[in-house]
Image (cartoon, coloured by chain):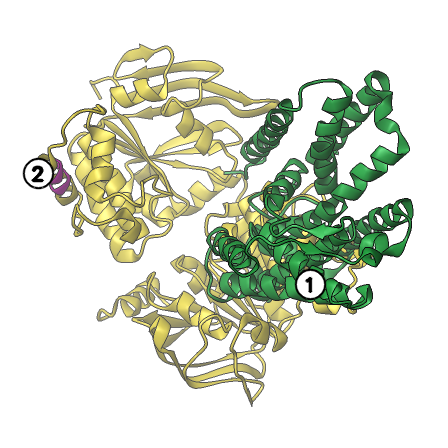
Chain colours: A yellow, B green
Amino acid sequence: MAAPPLLALHRIEKNHGGVRALRGVDFELHAGEVHALLGENGAGKSTLIKVITGAHRPDGGTITFAGQPVADLTPASARALGIACIYQQPALFPDLTVAENIALRLEAPAAARRIDWPARRARASALLARCGARFSPDAEVRALSMPEQQLVEIACALGSGARLVIMDEPTASLTRLEQELLFAVVRDLRLAGVGVVYISHRLEEIFALADRVTVLRDGRTVGTHAIAAIDEPGLIRLMVGREVAQVYPPAESAPGAPVLSLRDVGCTASGVHGVSFTVHSGEIFGLAGLVGAGRTELARVLFGLTPADSGEISLDGQPLALRSPRDAIARGLAYVPEDRRRHGVVLELPIAHNLTMAIHRRLFPGAWLRFGAERALALDYIRDLSVKCAGPEAPGGSLSGGNQQKVALARWLATKPRVLILDEPTQGVDVGAKGEIHRIIRRLAKEGLAVILISSDLPEVIGMSDRIGVMRGGTLHAILPGGSDPHTVMATALGAAA
Amino acid sequence: MKRYFRELSVLGALFVLLVGLTIFAPAFYQPQPLLSLLTREAPALVVACGMACVIITRQIDISVGSVFSVCSVCAGLLAARGWPLPLVLPAAIAVGALLGSINGLLVAGLGLPSIVVTLATMVALRQGLNLIRQGEFVNLPEAVQWFGLSQTAGQLVLVGAALAVLVALSFALRHLAAGRVIYAVGSDAEASRLAGLRPQLATFLVFVFVGALTGLAAMMNLVQSPQIQPLGGAGLELKVIAAVVVGGVAISGGRGNLWGASAGLLLLACISPALTHLRVEAYWEKAIQGTIIILAVAAEGLRGRRGGTRP
């Protein structure tokens, strides 16, 4: 191309204390390009973003923006250049309206200025329309869903006349439809000549959206490729540095006897209705569907959080009344919730405390704590699931996402459950840890557990499950065999003709 | 070491103060005044133990002062009627537990914020007491004072009782599953519910517990004086909460222990006599106490920022 690149990073280095987070990263972004940034957790993506947005000052290397060298980038000067970042968790003010949030970013601050409300609303409406948002500028941000909040962030970026937009895992919590909407916005940005740095763990998105992809590993650029010149195995190879022979471990055993049966189960409060299926011992039963299809709601019914008010649930042929998590745990159900950081692992408490939280009664008969037994159990699980940590006394918050997920899983394995419900077990987990978690799930099934696997990652739910239940609108629409065509699963989830 | 940084720094500050006093004001260590100081603080220590549990559970109880007053007056009236102390004691504890259970029901049962609930009960109990008692003092029979023992013996019993409560509760908090539940609920109530614990029950019981301990504290105060003031517990809540926070219990729940809380209480309590012995004007007491509290809260804030979770 004739024009100089919008952004060129050359041999960027950054040290955090003794850790060399970036050891010479080269990165180039042209105007009107969507450039995907890929790498395992800890590869240096977050640090690189912070360098581009001026939050971190690099220890070495040069930054060039639109042909001009930039000596010291600060958050303010980055904004002035037109660099905007849309984070995974939108940083908006929940009690203010959309228009007010947009105004806070875009209008010049002046305490004594009189606010031109109609102009403020008009501007917000125009920006929202540009990104295809269908909510009112007067809506309180608190009432918006996560993807809607992301649209507000994008509207802010558009309004500030951004020339470079960084999107950090923008689709992590989006449904398929919302993703399509977001993709359309990204394509609009590209047409308008904006450079987009797009970060995602989902390879299919990168193939659908990006022009080029740069892979980081251990703080270095390992390669930049035109998207047409590389395929999925090639990308994975670049990321992990080795060939991943089989993405999903194969099933090793045939399902056994029925364990958990649902007949016409419903819960008015959470909108689940008419769900019937049976999970067998040793079986992985996948639950696919769009976000909001009722999968998590169904899991919460099964775990007694929002008890069922119709239908029958039975375990080993015996009817079950599940009124609370305590009931469910006592009957051998276990639930690893979706929001790991909030509810899966207590970040302040040591790993050992986290592990034994659900088995106080069994491990500590007579209510006295037995520290020796607790430590032994913790060490067993740390070894068994290869949790990378400083020891059983390390707080849960000190672990990486994948290792936190293993601790959350271990807590429930310690209850010796019959049925294990996993809600998005690999969300936000890097590729290496993801494979480990998949192997653990397979092994548990082989040991005779009945596993219910909720996942929005379509290849995962198809690759891991023996059977796939597809949910839509609070009920189960079809049960498909494992390894089904992704298009069939998606079409069923969407309610479209296959 | 790092884990107990807050507790160790309070102990360090207390140690520095005590060593300073041996050098500059050895008179501080005369046995009788020192024993009197400890006896005066014994009831507050017992309440502080309960308050620490409440704050670890991520709640707060600012009604302890009013509960203390009500328990004192009830116990005083019973004693004045000639009830023997072994009967008055459980009665005082029961009144405290009952009042605590009202807080507990409102907070745990209805899910109301504890600061509002206990502010309401604090005011309601105080004004109710004013209305009923019209500011009247309760005169106690002489046999009640120091359990009918000599003053020194009585003081030793009280200090011993407070220490026993501290040791027992501290042990229970660390070694009983119930203690573990309190920390878990204070760290993340929803996570502990998902793990099959019962955060509402734990919250309710913790309020009952602090109420009962406040009843016990009222008894420990009762035997120290010939009369019961109508509002003897006014200000107790501030003193106790300050001690607990200074002692390293996180106001955001889930962290801290009773040893830290007692060290915090002693540190704040020693300021006034230390000033007297050092011939500094007593007006400085509140200023110094306030500074210590601000330092403690600032340390908490810094810890929260540094110890933040990984992105």
Highlighted range, magenta: A120-125
Residue A101's x, y, as percent? 24, 38
Residue B305's x, y, as percent? 54, 32
Residue A141's x, y, as percent? 27, 47
Q: Are marks 1 and 2 on the same chain?
A: no
Dot 1: chain letter: B
Secondary structure of residue under mark 1: helix
Residue at the image point whose x is 18% and y is 29% from the top: A193
Crowding near pointer 2: few (<14 within 10 Å), some, many (20+)?
few
Q: Is residue B69 left or right of residue B165?
A: left
Q: Which residue is mark 1?
A: B77
Q: Is residue B224 left or right of residue A296?
A: right
Mark 1–mark 2 contact, CB under 8 Å?
no
Q: Is residue B215 left or right of residue B133?
A: right
Residue at the image point whose x is 85% and y is 17% from the top: B23
Question: Taking B45 as reference, is A189 above or below it?
Answer: above
The reply to whether the magenta stretch includes residue A122 is: yes
Q: Which residue is mark 2?
A: A118
Q: Is residue A303 left or right of residue B26?
A: left
